[in-house]
């Protein structure tokens, strides 16, 4: 296609918006990308080819969708804003292998969607410029539902991307880091300036790639309880792990029992949650589970 036809140029984006009388809804977190170089980096990070599929969430006016259509064998885009459907129909008309679904990805049955849309492809990746206000719920839905994904490559708020990729010991490391790294291997691809969006967001952005693990990073006896222990451990970051867990799992009497369980798990009670690795959290949650703490929630 010629440059004139590319949606992702500032001139073309503005022309489409004006011609359709489209107005941005702040409540939907709409910020359209207008930089072909950044779009190229996003698509390249997904490692697509004509045997693979791509699921896009929030295609907007189709700038990224168009790039995906040029690389992948099948593209499905989920758009919540009904006003964008006629624009997408026009922009994506040359691509018969692209399907746009009107819906809220947080409410869709994604297992059914994958079965219907990607039955014949050799691997699927999610590739998206996500609305920042629903980044974490969307990503956790994608990971927790254990979909047959290779990669999740998304443009998100830089601060959130750094938290997802953070190693133990730093201020960015927390329950989100552990949840993402339990299911995937995160890698920051690039940071993105405000100037490549219409309208420009108030926060810095980054592209992150999550390579989805075939099996979780650590083996735990009870996955739900593992995440419950992680959440409890980070309840108040300045408190020690001992104090946080006491507040969550123990009545005021008999709290000294937790010190023994922490010792059994090989964790000093004076440590803070941000210093524990995934392996240590796995050992801790299994130790607490074996001791019957799942039934002792306060």
Image (cartoon, grey):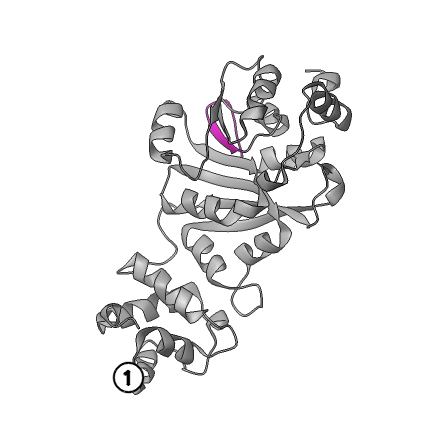
Q: Is residue 129 magenta?
A: no
Query: In the shown orientation, is residue 70 left or right of residue 5?
Result: left
Residue 53 is one of the magenta-drawn residues: yes
List x then y, in percent, for residue 194: 73, 44
Residue 251 appearing in the image: yes
Q: Left of 221 or right of it: where is 141? A: right
Q: Position of residue 193 (x, y in %)?
A: 73, 45
Specify whether 260 is left or right of 195. Answer: left
Q: Is residue 202 above or below residue 82?
A: below
Residue 14 in which image quadrant: top right
The stretch of residues the image draws in magenta is: 46-57
Which is nearer the eye, 55 or 167? 55
> What is the quadrant of the C terminus in the image?
bottom left
Quadrant location of the N terminus? top right
Where residue 227 appears, x then y in whole percent? 37, 61
| Residue occupying the point 53% across, 34% down | 47
Residue identified by numbered label 1: 257
Can you see residue 74? no
Count of number-bearing discs? 1
Q: Residue at 64% across / 47% down in the picture?
A: 206
Q: Secondary structure at mark 1?
A: helix
Q: Residues within 10 Å of mark 1 (few under 14, many from 20)?
A: few
State the residue at coordinates (48%, 35%): 125
Horizontal and vertical percent for residue 261?
Answer: 30, 79
């Amino acid at each position: 296609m010629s440059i004139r036809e590319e949606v992702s140029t500032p001139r073309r984006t503005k022309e489409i918006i004006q011609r359709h009388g489209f107005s941005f809804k702040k409540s939907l977190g709409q910020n359209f990308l207008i930089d072909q170089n950044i779009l190229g980096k996003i698509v390249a990070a997904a490692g697509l080819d004509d045997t693979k599929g791509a699921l896009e969430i929030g295609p907007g006016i189709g700038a990224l969708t168009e790039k995906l259509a040029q690389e992948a064998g099948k593209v499905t885009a989920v758009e919540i804003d009904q006003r964008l459907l006629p624009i997408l129909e026009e922009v994506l008309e040359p691509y018969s292998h692209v399907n746009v679904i009107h819906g809220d990805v947080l409410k869709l049955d994604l297992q059914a969607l994958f079965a219907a849309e990607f039955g014949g492809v050799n691997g699927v990746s999610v590739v998206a410029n996500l609305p920042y206000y629903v980044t974490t719920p969307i990503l956790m839905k994608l990971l927790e539902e254990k979909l047959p994904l290779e990669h999740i490559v998304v443009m998100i708020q830089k601060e959130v991307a750094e938290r997802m990729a953070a190693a133990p010991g730093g201020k960015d490391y927390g329950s989100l880091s552990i949840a993402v790294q339990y299911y995937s291997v995160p890698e920051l691809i690039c940071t993105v300036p405000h100037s490549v969006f219409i309208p420009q967001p108030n926060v810095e952005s980054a592209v992150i790639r999550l390579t989805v693990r075939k099996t979780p990073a650590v083996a735990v006896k009870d996955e739900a309880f593992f995440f419950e222990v992680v959440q409890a451990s980070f309840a108040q970051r300045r408190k020690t792990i001992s104090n946080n867990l006491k507040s969550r799992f123990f009545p005021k009497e008999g709290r000294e029992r937790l010190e023994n369980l922490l010792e059994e798990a090989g964790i000093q009670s004076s440590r803070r949650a941000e210093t524990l690795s995934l392996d240590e959290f796995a050992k801790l949650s299994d130790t607490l589970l074996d001791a019957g703490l799942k039934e002792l929630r306060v």
